[in-house]
Amino acid sequence: MVQEEKYNWNLQDLFKSESEFKKAKNEIEDNLKKIGDYKGILCDTAENLYNCYLIYEKTLELFDKVYSYGMFKYHLDMANQEGIKKFKEVESIATEFETSTAFIVPEITYADESKIYKFIEDYPNLKKYERDIKDTLEKKKHILTKAEEELLSKYSEVFSASENTFDILTNAEFKFGEIIKENGQSVQLTDATYTNFLKSQNESVRKQAFDLMYKKYSEYINTIAELYLSNVKTTAITSKIRKYNSSLERATDKDDASIKVYEALMEGVNNTLNINHNFISLKRELLKKNDFHMYDLYVNPFEEEKDEITFEEAKKEVLDALQVLGDEYVDKLKEAFNSRWIDVYEKPNKRGGAYSSGVYGVHPFVLMSFTSNKRDVSTIAHELGHSMHSYYSNKEQGIIDAGYTIMVAEVASTVNEILLSEYQIKNEKNPVKKAEIIYELLEMIRATFYRQSMFAEFEKIVHEKIENSEILSSEDLNNIYYELNEKYFGENIFIDQEIKYEWARIPHFYSDFYVYKYATGISAAICIATKILNREEGFVEKYISMLKQGRMKKSIDLLKMVDVDLESFDTYYRTAKYYEQKIADLKALL
C-alpha cells in the first residue's frame, strides 16, 4: 500500500542531500583531531579546557545528526543493504567519537580539583560547562588510579558474560513447545507471544502458556541461578572496589537518585499492599472464578471486539486530551503531526515497536507502527511526551546539558498517558467501554507500580544476602520470589508453584537496580497529572519549566520543582490512593 508522504518521516530535515551528510561526517573527523590535540594538556589552562569543550560541543551536535540519520535510514527498512551500510558507517563514527574523546573525563578527574574550580571561577566562558565538569569531579571519590581503571576496563567483557550467556540461552536456545490455540491450531510458544497468550479469554490457552514457559525455566533453573548470582557478585565486588557501601548505593548514585528514594518506594508500596490485594480480589469477581490463578491475571474481563480508529481520529483525540497542557504545548504537537516528525504506519522490514528520538538542533523523530487499534492512541501520546520533553530541553539547554537522566525519562511520557486515559474515561458514554478504559489504567498501575516494586524488592534482598556473604542456591532464590508473590498478591489468588521460577526470565535483573525507576516514574507522573487535572494555578507552567531543565539539576531536585519528592513516602502513598480511587470508580460502574 502506497502511503501518503505526510505520514512518513522527512529525513531532509537532517540532511538535504548525501553530500551534506558527507560534509558533516568529514567535519566530525577534523574536529576529533583538534580535540585530540588537547590530550595530556587539557587541564593545564582554563583556555585549554574551554576550547576543548567548545569543539567537543560542536562535534557532538554534528554527531547527533549524523548518527540519527544513519539509524533512521536503517530502521525504515532493516533489510535494505544501503541502509545497513549507512548504519554500520555511523556506528563506526560513534566508536571513533568515543575513543577520541575518552581522555576528557580521566584528565579532569585526575587534575587538581581546586585548580579546576578556580578555572570555573576566574574564566566566565567555562560557566557554560560547569554542570558537566562538576559532575565529573563529584564522582572522583569513586574513580580509581589510572592503572586500576585500565585493568577494570579490560575486564568489562568478562563482567557482562553472565548477561550475554543468559540472553543467548533464553532467546536463541530455549524452545518452549507448542500451544493449541482457541481455534485448535498448534503454534510455537515464544517469549514474545507469551503475554498475548496470557490475555486469551480461553483458560486452556492461558494455562498451557504458563505451564510450558515455566517448565522450560525449571529445567535450567540451576544454570540461570548461577548466571544471576555471578552477576550480583560482580556488582557487589565492583561496588566495593569503587568505595561504595553497597551495590544499591552505587546504582542509585549512578541514577542521580539516592538510597532514600529506594527505601521510600519500598515503604510506600509495602504499606499499601492491601489496595493491590483489593484489585486482585476484584479481578477474581469480574472473571467469576472460584479458582483464580496466576495465569488469569492478565485477562481483561471487559474486552470486546477491538475498536478501530483512523490515525486522524487518534491525532484529534491526543490533541484534545492534552489541551490541558496549554496552547504552546498543543501547537508544538500539531507541528509534530503536520511536519512529519512521525513515521506512522507499518512498512516491510521497518523496525518494530515505538520510540522517540530527539535530535539536537532539529526536532524529535517518532517511529511507530499504527495498526488502527485504540491502544495505538496511547502509544502516540506516550511517545509525544518524550518528544516534548526533548523539544523543551533541547531548546533551552546546550547539547551537553540537554539530555535528561533515566530517573525522569519516563515521567513526561507517562503523564501524557494518564491525561489521555482520564480524558477517555470522562468522555466515554458507553459504561462497558468506560469500564474497559479504567481497567486498563488500573492494570498499567498494578504492573508498573506494584509488580516492578516486587522485582525491586527481590533484587534488594538478593544483593544484601550476597553482600553479607550468604550462600544462595536456586531454591533459595525461588523461595524468596515465591514469598514475595504471596505478599504482593494476597489471599484471593492461588499462587501457583510455577511462579517461583518467574524471576529467572526477567532480563532487567542483569541491569542491577533498574526496575525501581519504572515505579518511581509512574508515581511522579500520577502526582503531576493529578495536579494538572485539578487545574492547580500555575502548575502547568511549573511542569513545562521542569521539562526545560534537561540535566541542569539533579533528578530529585528537578522533580521537586513540580512538588514531587521521590525521597518521601507521601509520593508513593499518593500513587496508591489514586489507584484505590480508580478501583472505586470501576466498582461504581458495575
Image: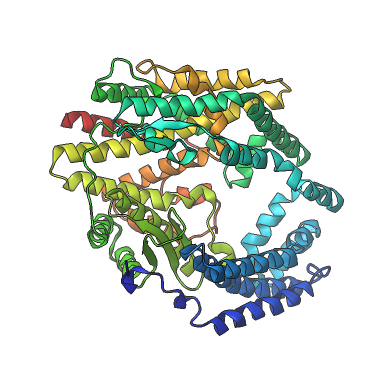
Q: Residue furthest right?
A: 147
| Spot occupied by residue 75 in the image (x, y as percentages of width and height) | 49, 62
The reply to whether residue 398 is in sight is: no
The reply to whether residue 448 is in sight is: yes
Q: Nearer the viewer, residue 392 or 478?
A: 478
| Spot occupied by residue 106 in the image (x, y as percentages of width and height) | 77, 58
The image shows residue 116, relative to residue 513, as above or below, that is: below
Q: Residue furthest left?
A: 429
Q: Nearer the viewer, residue 344 or 169?
A: 169
The quadrant the C terminus occupies is top left
| Spot occupied by residue 45 in the image (x, y as percentages of width and height) | 79, 72
> Quadrant of residue 92 in the image?
bottom right
> Quadrant of residue 392 in the image?
bottom left
The image shows residue 374, relative to residue 212, as above or below, that is: below
Q: Is residue 200 left or right of residue 61?
A: left
> Residue at left 67%, top 39%?
165
> Quadrant of residue 446 in the image?
top left
> Residue at left 47%, top 36%?
568
Q: Is residue 580 left or right of residue 111?
A: left
| Spot occupied by residue 301 in the image (x, y as percentages of width and height) | 25, 31
Q: Is residue 165 left or right of residue 579?
A: right
